Image: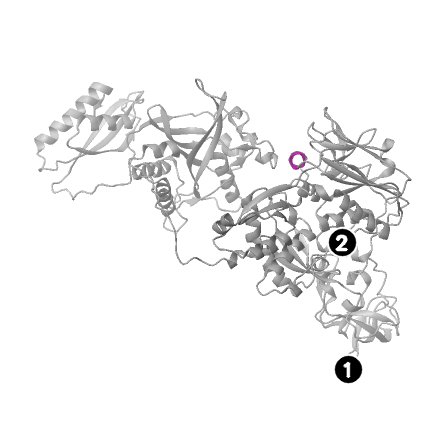
């Protein structure tokens, strides 16, 4: 949100310099993210001065150029070549001197000394649009004869200079969505500073409305609230005889400084009040209020409505509408309608000042994708008590700027007035939470500066009444936070003693295991990514692996691309790969830890009928080259076996080995080939090469290999972080190779498992070094070449012992798998 320094000065007396104000605001919770100097004329006309044309003659080398000498207050006049047809001796003009920067046609032009057709030019005589003071380019701008040469153009044209702060406003600070709200905090901090005397206290100056008079009886528009829950209060005022025209310069400057485009005097006044008080107003052409009735209601059926941006929108039954006797005029608190707004032909205005339910405004704005200045404030909670004051303030400005008369008394429909919030504040709790004992008088002064009233003072406590603009202050802790904000977090000293409690950490520690896993992956060339837990529902439509009915849907999504919680880390990772590929980074190894969410039917007597499930997962992604491109490296692409190697490493580091491998040749829509690591009836890890159809959806141009760890399940199986250490073996190991022919359906994992089950004492390792299918091998058969590492920890193995062990292995392979030794 943009806040103008000059505008703040109207409400706070004795305001310090802009850089000091920025530090104060940041310190009290209104973080100033940036600040910039703003000029009412872009660039501030730096380097532009008033000059007098002394002489003017035709350029000898051009029919349309003139040679001039111009007095700009220097000892010697400037020689300037001018192309304007209306230049003449004796004129007072605006001159851009050498080094000046002009902003013309959205281009930045720096004036330099130059030769034009052989003649020296030491500046530029400017037209109105070149200066930025108007739009005419008919010729140079000729000034009043009374203008004094050498006067700075910014002084002559009365260019306003301002400092504009960009404040990162948190959602709970609805009281600070205005200049008066920010000024209130600023004044409170200034008055709380050490050494401040009563005579030095700054005052918050709130504009008065004593000149308001609503005794007119010309025209009264009736207000009917049909949905008091969505619109607890609605105030209105009618004006007649107004003139819609351009706003005065001071008003346009105020709006331009904070990024609002001036439109006309009536609309500009409503925007001025919005930025001054933080309360949105809306102006209707009173002649478009059919039947002289304003009805606040919702339409039960879907209805078409054209908004100010000329877009036809389909209303929902949850959209609150401002209607006349014939139909809707405005989406309440969000956006106006095309036909009911103020136009140059408008002579009567009905001004709306209302309070709408924040929840309803938020849902409507999100549904229609309309983020307006009004919805920004209403959805955070506007001040319900200032609807009438805002009308009176606007009325004063309308009568001053647009003329006209107030045609009726203020209509204020407030069926159930809201009672002020009362909070009990204990000084003991205040001191404990802040960590410092504050002077009680200081606390009371801070509360008074914030507009919080003290109703009574029990022993070591206060009973407070919270003003309606502090919608987020409802508890004692909220009041303490307000006091601490103004007192200053930096004014709380570090304690000399540190108090802590002993906390037991679980074993194994989940954070430690996760960090070790991340370190292992990073040391092997992986990069960690973090994606949004919210994703688009379209990923799960017609998806057999992750059905749409299992999605946890967001009731008020920020956008249609963020309308469900993710069921898997897969799609976020593919989006990251697509992002990298589009930026010429096609070789990626990525990993992500994150929660996945689902909605599944309950079992047995569980209630509700469906329950939510949240699981932690780890995802690995590999694509592109296996090694960094180099003159002596192979240009090999990563494959499923590279990924499996990392998966095995991670499982080994977690101490997990009692799993069963299950191959998957076609795993529905996700994998074209894959492997599942299973423990009992549960899947621990699934990995594989992603299906081409899925890759194509993300415009990826190479294979992607993906592994998904059910980290919640995996962690429950971790056996601990301890590692046993043993001495190096004293006796040699022996390797024996074995080539066997068996059915194609037999897996290497089955052979490995059977070998360790058969030879438990001597067998240390089994490996596969060749697979062959082809000539001299029967159809439906294949040949495996295996190696076996045998070792006895107590003695050197003899040939007889080795042969016995190998014969046992051959026998079980023959009996179990009908294998034949080649």
* Helix, strand or loop under label 2: loop
Q: Is residue 749 rendered to the left or right of residue 126? A: left
Looking at the picture, tell me which residue is in the foreground, 159 or 300: 300
| Vertical comparison of 72 with 596: above or below | below
Q: Does residue 363 belong to the magenta stretch? A: yes
What secondary structure do most residues of the magenta stretch adopt?
A: helix
Which one is nearer the viewer's eye here, 12 or 808? 12
Looking at the image, residue 768 sits to the left or right of residue 492; the answer is left
The magenta segment: 358-367
SS of the residue under disc 1: loop
> Per the image, is 752 magenta?
no
Kindly report the distance in space between the C-alpha atoms of the residues bearing marks 2 and 1. 50 Å
The mark nearer the N terminus, 2 or 1, is: 1
Marks 2 and 1: CB-CB under 8 Å? Answer: no
Q: Quadrant of the C terminus?
A: top left
Mark whose residue sits in front, 2 or 1:
2
Report the disc number at residue 207: 2
Residue 746 relative to residue 88: left or right: left
Q: Few, some or many C-alpha atoms within 10 Å of disc 1 (few <14, some 14-19, many ≥20)?
A: few
Residue 482: where, in percent of width, then height? 58, 50
Q: Which residue is mark 1?
A: 75
| Quadrant of the image occupied by residue 157 | bottom right
- Please indicate, yes or no, whether residue 60 appears anywhere in the rendered image: no
């Amino acid at each position: 949100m943009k806040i103008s320094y000059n505008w703040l000065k109207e409400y706070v007396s004795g305001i310090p310099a802009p850089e000091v104000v920025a530090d104060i605001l940041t310190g009290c919770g209104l973080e100033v993210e940036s600040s910039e100097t703003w000029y009412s004329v872009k660039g501030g006309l730096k380097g532009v001065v008033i000059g007098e044309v002394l002489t003017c003659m035709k350029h000898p080398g051009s029919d349309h150029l003139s040679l001039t000498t111009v007095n700009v207050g220097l000892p010697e006049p400037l020689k300037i070549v001018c192309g304007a047809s209306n230049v003449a001796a004796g004129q007072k003009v605006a001159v851009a001197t050498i080094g000046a920067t002009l902003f013309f046609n959205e281009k930045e032009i720096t004036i330099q000394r130059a030769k034009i057709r052989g003649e020296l030019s030491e500046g530029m005589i400017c037209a109105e649009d070149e200066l930025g003071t108007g739009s005419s380019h008919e010729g140079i701008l000729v000034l009043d004869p009374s203008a004094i040469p050498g006067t700075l153009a910014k002084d002559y044209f009365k260019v306003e200079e301002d400092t504009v702060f960009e404040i990162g406003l948190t959602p709970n600070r609805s009281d600070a969505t205005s200049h008066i709200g920010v000024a209130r905090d600023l004044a409170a901090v200034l008055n709380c500073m050490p050494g401040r005397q009563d005579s030095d206290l700054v005052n918050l100056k709130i504009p008065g409305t004593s000149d308001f008079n609503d005794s007119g009886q010309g025209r009264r528009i009736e207000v009917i609230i049909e949905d008091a829950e969505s619109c607890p209060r609605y105030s209105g005022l009618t004006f007649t005889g107004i003139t819609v025209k351009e706003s005065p310069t001071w008003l346009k400057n105020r709006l331009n400084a904070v990024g609002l485009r001036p439109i006309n005097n009536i609309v500009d006044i409503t925007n001025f009040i919005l930025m001054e008080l933080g309360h949105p107003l809306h102006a209707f052409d009173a002649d478009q209020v059919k039947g002289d009735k304003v009805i606040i209601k919702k339409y039960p059926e879907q209805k078409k409505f054209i908004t100010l941006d000329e877009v036809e929108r389909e209303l929902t039954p949850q959209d609150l509408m401002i209607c006349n006797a014939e139909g809707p005029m405005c989406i309440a608190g969000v956006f106006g309608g095309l036909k009911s707004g103020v136009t140059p032909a408008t002579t009567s205005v009905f001004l709306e000042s209302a309070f709408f339910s924040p929840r309803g405004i938020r849902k409507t704005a999100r549904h229609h994708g309309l983020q307006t200045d009004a919805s920004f404030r209403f959805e955070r909670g506007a001040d319900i008590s200032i609807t009438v004051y805002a009308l009176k303030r606007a009325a004063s400005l309308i009568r001053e700027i647009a003329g006209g008369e107030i045609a009726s008394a203020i209509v204020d429909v407030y069926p159930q007035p809201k009672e002020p919030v009362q909070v009990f504040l204990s000084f003991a709790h205040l001191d404990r939470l802040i960590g410092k004992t504050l002077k009680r008088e200081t606390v009371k002064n801070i509360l008074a500066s914030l507009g919080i009233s003290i109703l009574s003072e029990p022993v070591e406590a206060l009973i407070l009444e919270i003003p309606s603009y502090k919608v987020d202050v409802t508890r004692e802790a909220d009041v303490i936070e307000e006091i601490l904000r103004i007192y200053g977090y930096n004014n709380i000293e570090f304690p000399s003693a540190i108090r802590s409690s002993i906390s037991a950490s679980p074993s194994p520690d989940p954070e430690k295991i996760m960090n070790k896993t991340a370190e292992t992956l990073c040391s092997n060339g992986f990069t960690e990514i973090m994606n949004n837990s919210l994703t688009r529902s379209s990923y799960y439509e017609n998806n057999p692996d992750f059905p749409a009915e299992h999605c946890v849907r967001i009731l008020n999504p920020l956008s249609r691309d963020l309308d469900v919680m993710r069921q898997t880390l897969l799609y976020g990772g593919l989006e990251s790969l697509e992002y990298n590929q589009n930026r010429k980074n096609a070789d990626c190894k990525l990993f992500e830890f994150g929660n996945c969410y689902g909605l599944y039917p309950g079992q047995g007597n569980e209630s509700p009928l469906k329950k939510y499930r949240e699981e932690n997962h780890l995802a690995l992604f590999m694509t592109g080259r296996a090694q960094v491109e180099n003159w002596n490296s192979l240009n090999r692409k990563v494959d499923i076996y590279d990924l499996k190697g990392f998966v095995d490493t991670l499982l080994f580091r977690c101490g997990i080995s009692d799993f069963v491998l299950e191959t998957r040749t076609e795993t529905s829509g996700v994998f074209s080939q894959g492997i599942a690591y299973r423990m009992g009836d549960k899947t621990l890890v699934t990995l594989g090469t992603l299906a081409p159809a899925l890759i194509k959806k993300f415009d990826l141009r190479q294979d992607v290999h993906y592994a998904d760890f059910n980290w919640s399940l995996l962690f429950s199986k971790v056996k601990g972080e301890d590692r046993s250490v043993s001495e190096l073996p004293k006796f040699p190991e022996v390797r024996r190779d074995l080539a066997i022919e068996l059915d194609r359906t037999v897996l290497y994992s089955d052979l490995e498992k059977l070998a360790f089950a058969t030879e438990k004492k001597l067998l240390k390792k089994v490996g596969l070094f060749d697979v062959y299918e082809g000539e001299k091998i029967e159809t439906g058969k294949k040949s495996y070449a295996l190696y076996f590492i045998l070792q006895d920890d107590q003695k050197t193995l003899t040939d007889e012992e080795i042969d016995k062990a190998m014969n046992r292995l051959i026998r079980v392979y023959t009996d179990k798998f009908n294998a034949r030794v080649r």
